[in-house]
Image (spheres, rainbow, N blue to C red):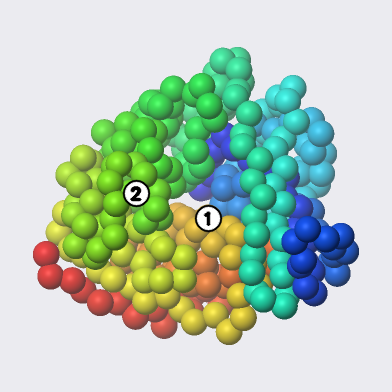
Amino acid sequence: MIVAAGLTPAWQHILRFERLRLGEVNRAAEAHQCASGKVFNVGIALAHLGAECRAISPLGADVAERVRAEFAGFGLEASLIGQAEPTRVCTTLLDDATGAVTELVENARPLSAEILDEFREEFAAHALAADVVVLSGSLPAGTDAAYYLELMERTVGPVVLDARGPELLEALAMSPMFVKPNREELAHTLGRPLDTDRTLRAAMCELVELGAEWVVVTEGAKAVWLASGEASYRLAPLRVARVVNPIGCGDCLAAGLAWGLSLGREPLECVRLGIACAAQNAAALLPGRLDPERALQDAAQVAVEPLAR
């Protein structure tokens, strides 16, 4: 069992336009709605990969029934903590004419102490039996930066942590197996620019020294960097013939890491699986709808360059 947990789910609107014109009335050629946000994207991806997974998240009553119905169709188990506030809505605008993707993000609302306590208890009930745990997403405003650290104290299996800022730094004391910020998030976390390969690798080594077993850094369609205390690698992204919707690619990479760990793969092979999952996601309209056989085949094509320490 893999547990995917997070506090900032979303209800996603995806609108595709033949040509998007700012400042004008635009009529969508296609419209979709689905559960999303990092925690749900990870859970959906894992369910499609065939992994036994439970998603744990707060959720507003406004979309709870639609989310439950969607998850039932995927075979994704979920512990949805009811909250009075509506779930945030995020909107993706896809422009066919230019290939541009515009994301309109509503920030997550603060959560009450009661919701945070209920989430913590529900997480503890499942995390102790989990083979792998994925913690993903920023903490809502007002949540203690040590919240992920507290959750990891209730975990015995390896943890994939997709976070940034103080919550990432606090959690390093529990030695997560993988931490997965993107380059911008890592720069924000450490409070300095990472505009050269040298400064990026130094920052990754700093996270390792603070407790991370492996650090994975992404940068959109560019190379993926991987480092531990013993080795460093640069992995080439897979070519995507046509990018349809890149939203959720980082979450699918995190799902691939967790899937690989659950299959008993070595860390480097887990990252290759993650890259394959991210590339597959970029070519699809809805996030997380992955084909496990294709992911396994594509992972073998990911080129790996060992780097001198």
Decide: is 239 above or below 85: below
Q: Which residue is mark 1?
A: 251
Mark whose residue sits in front, 2 or 1: 2
- Looking at the image, how many numbered discs can be counted on the residues? 2
Looking at the image, can residue 46 be seen? no
Decide: is 204 above or below 304: above
Is 207 on the left or on the right of 54, as rendered? Answer: left
Query: Residue 178, labelled with which disc?
Result: none
Query: Residue 56's quadrant in the figure?
Result: top right
For marks 2 and 1, give the CA distance.
Answer: 16 Å
Query: Residue 163's quadrant in the figure?
Result: top left
Q: Position of residue 109 (x, y in %)?
A: 63, 29
Residue 199 or residue 79, whichever sits in front: 199
| Residue at x-position 21% and y-position 40% | 210
Q: Residue furthest top?
A: 114
Is 63 on the left or on the right of 145, as rendered? Answer: right
Residue 3 or residue 271, whichever sits in front: 271
Query: Residue 186, labelled with which disc?
Result: 2
Q: Residue furthest front?
A: 23
Q: Position of residue 238 (x, y in %)?
A: 46, 78
Q: Position of residue 32 (x, y in %)?
A: 80, 59
Residue type of the residue flagged with mark 2: Leu
